[in-house]
Amino acid sequence: MVRLEKKQENERMPRKAREKSATAIYHVVFRGINRQVIFEDKEDRIKYLELLKEYQEISGYKIYAYCLMSNHIHLLMKEGQEELGTVFRRLGASYVYWYNWKYNRSGHLFQDRYKSEPVEDDAYLLTVVRYIHQNPVKAGISGNPMDYPWSSYREYFSDGGLCETRYILRLFSEDLATAKEQFESFNQAEENSQCLEIDEKKRWKDPEAIDLIKQLAGVMNLSDVQQLEKQKRNEVLISCKNEGLSIRQIERLTGISFGVVRKA
């Protein structure tokens, strides 16, 4: 009886409160439930960025960096009029409604609670910016942050967008051209800092990996992946790598060469 009462007491314990940031700036990470893919194609990513922009105007938050991976998202942002918890409830509900409608599904899409860490000083702010932009590089999806279209990196070299790029650039130099040069050098440098991250990637056994590849490619047989149009094939390979499949495993299961998988 005592053990049961303790268990029930533990079940009623509230979740640990989020650590508050004195600057109101946070590095936020959230992912698909059970590591589910949350961005199937280009349209999905565009829709999410549109919603980020829409709710930015409503909630008043500022974004300094973002990166959309296939099954998780990194955001570096500053709270506005609304707390981030409220923002993500609004944003998540809108995207999930649209996603479920598009794919004729129901139920949850995102893991129930986003993860966040406070960013209290300029040095760590820049560290997180670089960390976020290097996500696709470390995942083996892109060789250079500039080559990945679904992060904020390119916004720092163009006009307009979601991010408050000038705030970050001024940390390098008041001269915009100089700031961009130094920003590029900084972001190209190797990043080994321990920033907030999603849980470690799942180790895929071959039967699970086979099912995943078939699902992502929309094929009945693995050999059919080789016959896909090049752009579609590369999208599938990128998604596989982002899900944690190794290049060697993808090569072995699909018959697609190591070099093609690596470059996708």
Image (tube, rainbow, N blue to C red):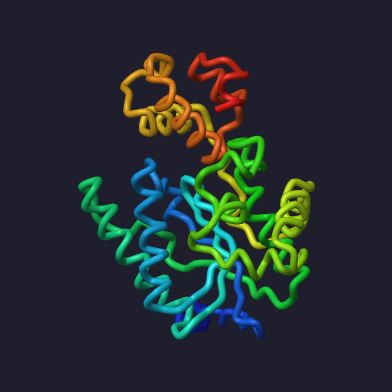
* Residue 89 relative to residue 145: left or right: left
- Picture quarter containing residue 116? bottom right
Residue plotted at (26% across, 60% down): 97
* Residue 79 relative to residue 176: left or right: left
- Picture quarter containing residue 142? top right
- Asked whether residue 52 is in view, the answer is yes
Residue plotted at (47% across, 27% down): 234
Residue plotted at (65% across, 70% down): 167
**Rendered location of residue 65, percent (x, y):** 58, 61
The foreground one among 25 and 215 is: 25
* Residue 41 relative to residue 17: left or right: left
**Rendered location of residue 113, percent (x, y):** 47, 68
Residue 24's place in the image compared with 259, above or below, is: below
* Residue 26 relative to residue 189: left or right: left
Residue 7's place in the image compared with 42, above or below, is: below
Residue plotted at (77% across, 55% down): 182
State the quadrant of the C terminus.
top right
**Rendered location of residue 123, percent (x, y):** 78, 69
The foreground one among 231 and 205 is: 231
- Asked whether residue 1 is in view, the answer is no
